[in-house]
Amino acid sequence: MDELLEASKLLKAGLDRYINACSVTTSLYNPANRENDNSPVLNAITDELQMVATYEKNVRNAQSILSKGRNTSLALVPINLLPSELLEWIFELAYYSWLRSVDIENVQPEDGDDEDVPSDYIQYNMDVKLPSPMFPETLTRVCAHWRQVALSSHRLWSRIDVPIFSQSYKRLLLRGRTFSSQTNSPGLDVHILMANGEMERESLYDQLDQFCTTVGSKIRALQLTNGVKSRIFYPKFRLAPLLAASFAHLTPGTLDHLALIDHHPPKPNFINSTELAQESDYWQDSGMRIKLPQRQIDEVLRPIQSLWLKNHYFPWESPAYYGLVDLRLLRSEKITETFIESTQLRGILSASPKLRTFQCAIKVKGANAAVQDLSGPIYLAELEDLHLRQMEYRESQHVISLISPGPKPLSLSIQIGTSSLSESVFSAHVLAFFARSNVTALHIESHGWSCPRLPLGRLLTDSPRTTRIIGLQWFNLTQETIPPIDPGQSYLTQLDCLNLTQCVFHIETLQQMIALCPVRVMKLPEPRLIVDDEEVVPESKETLDRLAAIFPVVKCVNEDTPMEEWNSWGTMEWEWETV
């Protein structure tokens, strides 16, 4: 035991010395001097690289020896001795984590609007690569026991991904048929992604049609995504043929979830059958037309419970909007012409009394008239998630006036306008919504890109007392002092989590805040510290160390994850610990 500890200390000291020597040696080599190509320094670096490979092998050998010793402990249960039900559950957790880590449906082409991309550059297709190894089939190649457990789990084989970016889509369709054969009951989750416009041929849609003929009766969830940019002179609705190929073979009553995501539409439009097109539509914009009878489309749509639409929508009177538990009306950032009348939105919400999630990013016309409606707000007893952060803040505050949530804990995401220290952070409509709801998570984004100052004292007094999580985006938290709260005035006295993204702040300001309202966990993707000369200092060890000194737990989150998901299961995060 003593020998192991002593050897470990010597190894650590030796590694520190070795790394320092490597840094000093490489700093002596000047690649600009051609005479150094055969210098002793370069030769030493080259030879040492070969030795490093040997060191790595020896370290792995030591790790193997220690692991074998640890695994003999009676306190540890070898994974192969676990009950099959528990092993199957572990496989599913690993599989879902893998799916999140390799999600390619949100990858979009680059163009001149992106950072570090030439202004005249346009990439029309998505840069997609298949992950390796592929799950879950890799689990079947470990041993006979794992193969038996994996093959017996229907949920492991229920997800079928077909990214169309090269001729490999043919192999992925065969893979999907194999997955389908592993499950007997309806429960397939099919994701088809158009990633390369050059693959668009009649043969592609013929093969998709044949694939859906085989698996259509088992599809419970269907997501069709287009990530290909339309060329200016050749606009195309790429979702239309995908819809026609899949909808023709779906069994009415089986489809539970439908997502139609078009990142780059020629323009937003409504989806209808070609049989509804009139002759006059030939020379006019007639929307996205599907070559199926409207009756067949409605029969597939009527029973669904979850509907996600981005940039293309079914007509607002469609049966697709009846009886939903999850409705998301999304749009791309630059597309603003899509709108819904407030009376139509009221009708949709009234037709889905069991709605749990509602996300809206499109314009709502006549919102003020909707607020004055004598029938009052619509009671949604099951509502748990109301996401209006992509809406302009004046519109969103009127939309929430349409809604009266039930007693369930609610996550609310909104924009707010600028306010002074003497004004409420929230509008009268939002404060009234707080009074009739049980908001436990509050995600707030500033209106515009100005990063205005947010009075934290008013935030504590104006937020619902039931709030346990607050997320802030695009705010300046650098006021010198937080004004004292009037005696007798109630305010938030405790938070489970404070999420900050794209905010600037003084450490001292946050210290004043937690003196009034202790925070258990702080999460942030890219911490920012404002120093005395107003210079923004990027993420640094010193900043995180200072935060860790005042918050019990400090965690960093992947910056691409929306802050509404920071406290969800499966979100990639890591805890910062001071040394």
Image (cartoon, rainbow, N blue to C red):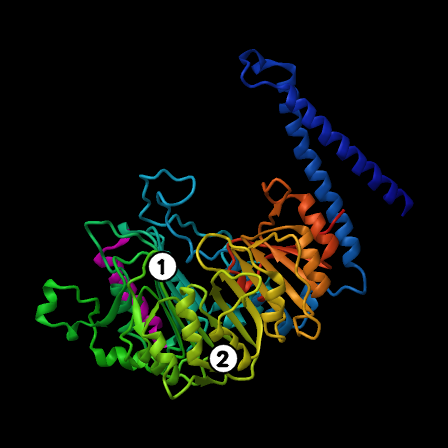
As helix, strand or loop, the secondary structure at mark 1 comes to: loop
Q: Is residue 302 above or below residue 73?
A: below
Mark 2 sits on what residue? 383
Q: Is residue 137 visible?
A: no
Determine which of the numbered discs, if any, sits on residue 452 in the image: none
Seen as rendered, the residue at the extreme bottom is 375
Which is nearer the eye, 386 or 190? Answer: 386
Across and down, in percent, residue 163 comes to: 37, 57
Across and down, in percent, residue 231 comes to: 24, 49
Q: Amino acid at mark 2?
A: Leu
Q: Is residue 39 above or below residue 225?
A: above
Q: Is residue 464 visible?
A: yes
Q: CA distance from mark 2 to mark 1?
A: 25 Å
Q: What span is colored magenta in the figure? A: 199-217
Q: Amino acid at mark 1?
A: Ser
Query: 10 Å neighbourhood of mark 1: few (<14), some, or many (≥20)?
Result: some
Across and down, in percent, residue 399 comes to: 41, 74
Based on the picture, tell me whether residue 296 belongs to the magenta stretch.
no
Based on the picture, tell me whether residue 212 belongs to the magenta stretch.
yes
Helix, strand or loop for the magenta stretch, by majority: helix
As helix, strand or loop, the secondary structure at mark 2 comes to: loop
Residue, x 55% and y 14% (percent of image)? 33
Location of residue 259 (image quadrant): bottom left
Residue, x 21% and y 58% (percent of image)? 202
